[in-house]
């Protein structure tokens, strides 16, 4: 049996449900995607961007506590996060409005 997403450090039931809505059902699938692609899928599934959630994911995939991220490392993660959010915003604007609505209400899976 595959490990649940919530078996990854820093990720609980709410994260597990959000990743499931994005089509990521297991810890193994999440690890295989890596933090940036997994977070991009969350955004495409309608999750609102949240920097703390992003860096908690990154830290968790490294086996580190969420609050271990500080200084230059945190600044670098913020830059990655900002690029992900900007890319998502650009892609969302380029999508067909009807398909975007289907994604937002959960009719389609990205």
Image (cartoon, rainbow, N blue to C red):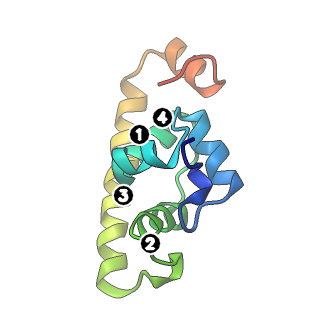
Q: To which quarter of the image does residue 10 belong?
A: bottom right
The residue that appears at 47% across and 67% down in the rendered structure is 60
Q: Earlier in the sequence, mark 2 or mark 4?
A: 4
The residue that appears at 63% across and 17% down in the rendered structure is 107
- How much space separates mark 4 and mark 1, taking CA atoms? 9 Å
Q: Earlier in the sequence, mark 4 or mark 3?
A: 4
On the rendered image, what quadrant is the N terminus found in?
top right
Task: Say if 3 sits above or below 77 in the image.
Answer: above
Between 74 and 12, the one lying in front of the other is 12
- How much space separates mark 2 and mark 1, taking CA atoms? 30 Å
Residue 33 location, x and y as percent? 35, 44
Residue 85 location, x and y as percent? 40, 49
Residue 46 location, x and y as percent? 57, 36
Q: Which residue is mark 1?
A: 89
Q: Earlier in the sequence, mark 2 or mark 1?
A: 2
Label disc, if present, on residue 63 of the rendered structure: 2
Task: Say if 80 sits above or below 32 in the image.
Answer: below
Secondary element type, mark 4 = helix
- How much space separates mark 2 and mark 4, taking CA atoms? 26 Å
Q: Earlier in the sequence, mark 4 or mark 1?
A: 4
**Front: mark 2 or 3:** 2
The answer to whether marks 2 and 3 mark residues whose Cβ atoms lie closer than 8 Å is no
Q: Which residue is mark 4?
A: 44
The answer to whether marks 2 and 4 mark residues whose Cβ atoms lie closer than 8 Å is no
Categorize mark 3 by other alpha carbons within 10 Å: few (<14), some (14-19), many (20+): some
Task: Say if 70 sits above or below 80 in the image.
Answer: below
The residue that appears at 31% across and 60% down in the rendered structure is 80
Q: Earlier in the sequence, mark 3 or mark 1?
A: 3
The answer to whether marks 4 and 1 mark residues whose Cβ atoms lie closer than 8 Å is no
- How much space separates mark 3 and mark 1, taking CA atoms? 10 Å
- How much space separates mark 2 and mark 3, taking CA atoms? 23 Å
Q: Which residue is mark 3?
A: 82
């Amino acid at each position: 049996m595959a490990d649940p997403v919530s078996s990854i450090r820093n990720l609980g039931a709410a994260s597990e449900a959000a990743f499931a809505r994005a089509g990521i059902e297991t810890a193994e699938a999440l690890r295989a995607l890596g933090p940036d692609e997994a977070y991009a899928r969350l955004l495409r599934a309608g999750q609102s961007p949240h920097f703390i959630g992003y860096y908690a994911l990154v830290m968790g995939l490294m086996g580190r506590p969420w609050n271990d991220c500080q200084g230059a490392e945190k600044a670098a993660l913020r830059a990655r996060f900002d690029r992900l959010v900007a890319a998502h915003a650009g892609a969302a604007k380029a999508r067909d409005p009807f398909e975007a609505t289907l994604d937002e209400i959960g009719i389609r899976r990205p």
